[in-house]
Structures are given as structure tokens and as C-alpha cells.
């Protein structure tokens, strides 16, 4: 009986030690960003540094806006249903809608790492890193 209990405890210990971290890396690339203004709307263009076998891979994301802070969570790389056979990065065009002039903080979340960026909305858009992470200004 003692042998069974010892074996059971050893097995449980091995199972616990083999558990993966709660945050798994789903996007194995840094992301490059830029900002553009189109028809009074602000867009963040994002693309992976890594190239994929099809040029039409996309980046799945979610976004949330609260006053002057925008949070963008990059979730996963989406493989297309049909492949345009050319190497290229996965991309996302994030529509921030119309923003009043001023400074905004954008928090990008990628694989558990936060990057904070200041977006200055004036006649010319500008991005500036506040806290570096794995999202890079292009």
C-alpha cells in the first residue's frame, strides 16, 4: 500500500511539473506597427516580422477604447482558407475610428507582454514608444 501511495504522489508531481504556463505563445513574431489617417479615421497597420508561406495570413486581435486609452490585444495568426502563394507577413488593419486631436495611449498586448505607445493625433499622426515590448514602430 505504501508503494502505491508513493507511486501516486510521484505521478501527480510529474503531471504538475509538466503543466504549461498559463500564457502560451500564439504569435511567434514581433509585430511592426504604423499609423495612418484615411477619411478622417485613424488606422493602425500591424504586421509580423516573420514571413508566412501565404501573403494573405492575418492577425486576429481585439480592441477596446476608454477615453484616451486604447488597448489592442493580438490573439493569434489566422491561416487563410485559400493561399496566395507568395511569402509575406501576417497583417491587421485596425480601425480606431475618428479620434479628436490630442495624445492617446495605446497598450498593445502580445503573448503576455505589454508595449505602451503614445499616439499623437494632429495634422500629422505620430507614434512614440513609452514602454518597450514586442511591438515595434515601423
Image: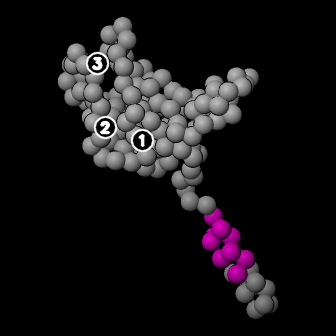
Q: Which mark is residue 135?
A: 1
Kindly report the distance in space between the C-alpha atoms of the residues bearing marks 2 and 1: 9 Å
Magenta segment boundaries in residue numbering: 10-19
Kindly report the distance in space between the C-alpha atoms of the residues bearing marks 3 and 2: 16 Å
Q: Which residue is mark 3?
A: 99
Q: Are marks 2 and 1 in contact (CB under 8 Å)?
A: yes
Q: Residue furthest front?
A: 86
Q: Which residue is mark 2?
A: 117
Which SS class for mark 1?
A: strand
Q: Residue furthest top?
A: 39
The quadrant the N terminus occupies is bottom right
Q: Residue at x 70, y 22 (%)?
A: 84
Q: Is residue 14 found inside the magenta-colored segment of the image? A: yes
Name which of mark 1 and mark 3 comes first in the sequence. Answer: 3
Which SS class for mark 2?
A: strand
Which SS class for mark 3?
A: loop
Amino acid at each position: 500500500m505504501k508503494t502505491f501511495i508513493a507511486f501516486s504522489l510521484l505521478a501527480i508531481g510529474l503531471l504538475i511539473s509538466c503543466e504549461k504556463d498559463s500564457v502560451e505563445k500564439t504569435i511567434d513574431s514581433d509585430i511592426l506597427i504604423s499609423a495612418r489617417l484615411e477619411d478622417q479615421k485613424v488606422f493602425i497597420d500591424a504586421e509580423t516580422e516573420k514571413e508566412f508561406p501565404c501573403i494573405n495570413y492575418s492577425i486576429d486581435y481585439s480592441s477596446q477604447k476608454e477615453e484616451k486609452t486604447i488597448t489592442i490585444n493580438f490573439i493569434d495568426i489566422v491561416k487563410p482558407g485559400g493561399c496566395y502563394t507568395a511569402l509575406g507577413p501576417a497583417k491587421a488593419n485596425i480601425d480606431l475610428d475618428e479620434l479628436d486631436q490630442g495624445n492617446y495611449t495605446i497598450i498593445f498586448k502580445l503573448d503576455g507582454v505589454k508595449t505602451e505607445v503614445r499616439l499623437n493625433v494632429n495634422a500629422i499622426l505620430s507614434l512614440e514608444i513609452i514602454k518597450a515590448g514586442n511591438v515595434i514602430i515601423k
